[in-house]
Amino acid sequence: MQIMYFCMQIICNNYLIVKREYSISIYLDTRRPKSNGKYPVKLRVFSSNPRKQKLFPTVFDLTKKEFDSIWLSTKPRNKNKKIRMQIQAIETKANEIADKLNIFSFEQFERKMFREKGEGTKISYHYHQLIEHYRKNNRLGTADSYKYSEKAISEFVENKNKKYNKLSFFDIDKNWLNEFENYLKITGRSITTVGIFLRPLRAIFNKAIAENEIEQEIYPFGKRKYQIPSSRASKKALTREQLKILFNSTPSTPEQEKAKAFWFFSFNSNGINIKDIALLKFKNIDGETIKFYRAKTLFTSKSDLKPITIYLNDYAKSFIEKYSNKNTHPENYVFDIISETMNAEEQRLKIKGFTRFINQHLKKLCKSIGLPNEISTYWARHSFATTSIRKGATMELIQESLGHKNIKTTQSYFNGFEDETKKELAKQLMDF
């Protein structure tokens, strides 16, 4: 018994046809008998695009004669009807799952076919799926974001004397989200942290809707529903005078000297972040320039990837000469932060530790010279953007230099014009 499904969507105005083909059948695998002398009954799934077949086990074992009389016969005997109905239920379930997939894939089919009943509407199931997905793709920072988000939700649910593993999409509405937000604030989390914890939950809702696990109607986010709070981004750029003080300062330890050097290399190199510095290889350096792809955009903007070009000034050149590895093979990393022998998790921890090292020692230096001691590596990126715009660079140029897809992101980096510039402009207004 076999059913071939053809799902076709026609959009007449644009003459667009989308076609999906797969077939599902019950199959007796007679390649080798089991110890009981019978053959395993399997679920056979065939996809025509790409052309692929997979056999999935069932709990049934039958002889060829039994399979013919139970499954292939148009009029099975009464004693065989119960087994036939049980096998039919497997095939029906498989067809229903495959039919609901927007695009058929064995990965999604297997996940939905063999999970426990009701798992598809559970929040914990989808968190675990996405965390595992991001870990497999070496997006370990994103996986951690989802893990921390799930932990906060679990704490909130358990605090209400309920079980987190029972929490479903249907339990979460606007009121639930407001309660969760208030809980986070009461327990000392900032508005920024509230947003960090809630955005993964929103993404999980979107994923479940896209996979036809839930209906759009229960989506609790958006206009006239719950809106994730966002704080106004604080400006993190040093002024021209502060940059001069920091650059001319004398570090009191070798650690402070190294931290200061890496901070100014970032500042002089389009505000490149520490992860991208760590991932630079000698093949990225070509005489007067560095060309690289931001690690972040390799995952988020695959369709329109553009390399960032850094034009090396004298400071950047002397820094590379001083701190780079001696073996300049094109595939070697430029700086001694990570190594090729480390796996993705080890590299992530090393980069995280090195960023912490820079921030820790830079804060000590800045505190000793009267500069903001909340300074961090990220301030170099903001300071590059603000200083460049104040010196006449266009917002579009800085957008390209930073690798931003949206110019609004670049605009949020700009810390405004200094008072002296505004005063000078006021003086010139009547200079017709």
Image (spheres, rainbow, N blue to C red):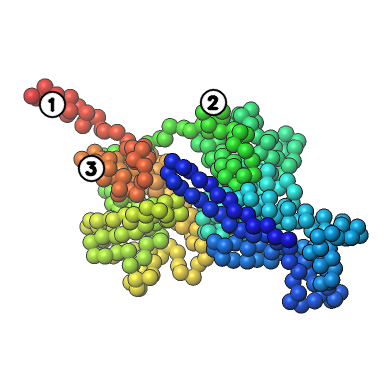
Q: Which residue is mark 2?
A: 224
| Side of 12 relative to 290 (left or right) | right
Q: Which residue is mark 1?
A: 428
- Give percent across and percent down for residue 266: 33, 52
Q: Is residue 309 above or below residue 119?
A: below
Q: Classify the position of the C terminus by image quarter.
A: top left
Badge 3 vs badge 1, beta-carbon distance below 8 Å: no
Which disc number belongs to residue 393?
A: 3
Sequence-first tag of 3 and 1 = 3
Amino acid found under the numbered disc labelled 1: Gln
- The residue at 19%/27% (across/down) is 423
Task: State the SS at label 3.
Answer: loop
Task: State the SS at label 1.
Answer: helix
Place residue 219 in its image quadrant.
Answer: top right
- The residue at 54%/63% (across/down) is 50
- Give percent across and percent down for residue 151: 64, 44
Sequence-first tag of 1 and 2 = 2
Closer to the eye: label 1 or 2: 2
Q: Residues within 10 Å of mark 1 (few under 14, many from 20)?
A: few
Amino acid found under the numbered disc labelled 2: Arg
Q: Is residue 191 above or below residue 136?
A: above
